[in-house]
Image (spheres, rainbow, N blue to C red):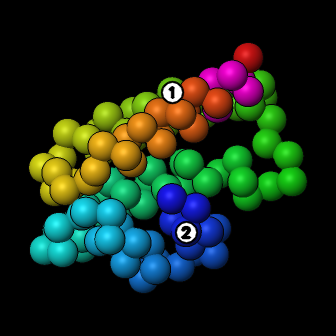
């Protein structure tokens, strides 16, 4: 997953798409789901890494925003190839973000 984080931090859209394909997003769906679902999630996820210090306390809605984006994404059938490992990783990071918010 760190490769995706790095490609988002570099704003490398083509690399993002390549990595999502390797993670199981169907090739015939990537152009449909990337801009509407995957890109917003990746941008939300990497926001805390884009600055020297991210104050979760000053941004208490950050976690809830991520939940909304993730739930919207998971409803879309175009990401049905995603593996369970991706969801577990995202839940762990979300848990850490929640702790940091408190």
Quarter holding residue 46: bottom right
Q: Magenta stretch containing residue 70, yes or no?
A: no
Whether 18 is drawn above or below 78: the answer is: below
Which one is nearer the viewer's eye here, 20 or 35? 20
Mark pair 1, 2: CA separation:
25 Å
How many neighbours does mark 2 have within 10 angstroms: few (below 14), some (14-19), or many (20 or more)? Answer: few
Q: Nearer the viewer, mark 1 or mark 2?
A: 2
Choose between 102 and 3: the one closer to the eye. 3
Q: Position of residue 86 (x, y in %)?
A: 39, 48
Query: Percent position (x, y) of residue 100?
Result: 73, 27
The relative height of residue 13 versus residue 85 in the rendered view (above or below) is below
What is the secondary structure assignment of the residue under circle 1? Answer: helix
Compared to residue 21, the image places residue 51 above or below, namely above
Helix, strand or loop: magenta stretch = helix
- The residue at 63%/75% (across/down) is 10
Residue drawn at the location 48% of the way across and 42% of the way down: 89
Magenta stretch in the rendered image: 97-101
Which residue matches tag 2?
3
- The answer, for residue 61, to whether it is visible in the render is no
Q: Quadrant of residue 79?
A: bottom left
Closer to the chain start, of discs 1 and 2, is: 2
Camera-side residue of 62 and 86: 86
Residue 66: image x %, image y %? 48, 37
Give the tally of numbered discs. Answer: 2
- Circles 1 and 2, Cβ within 8 Å, touching? The answer is no
Residue designated by label 1? 64
């Amino acid at each position: 997953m760190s490769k995706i984080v790095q490609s988002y931090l570099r704003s490398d859209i083509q690399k993002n798409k390549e990595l999502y394909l390797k993670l199981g997003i169907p090739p015939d769906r990537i152009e449909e789901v990337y801009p509407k679902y995957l890109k917003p999630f990746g941008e939300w996820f990497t926001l805390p890494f884009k600055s020297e210090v991210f104050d979760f306390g000053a941004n208490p809605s950050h976690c809830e925003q991520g939940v909304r984006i993730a739930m919207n994404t998971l409803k879309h059938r175009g990401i049905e190839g995603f593996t369970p490992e991706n969801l577990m990783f995202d839940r762990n990071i979300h848990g850490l973000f929640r702790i940091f918010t408190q």
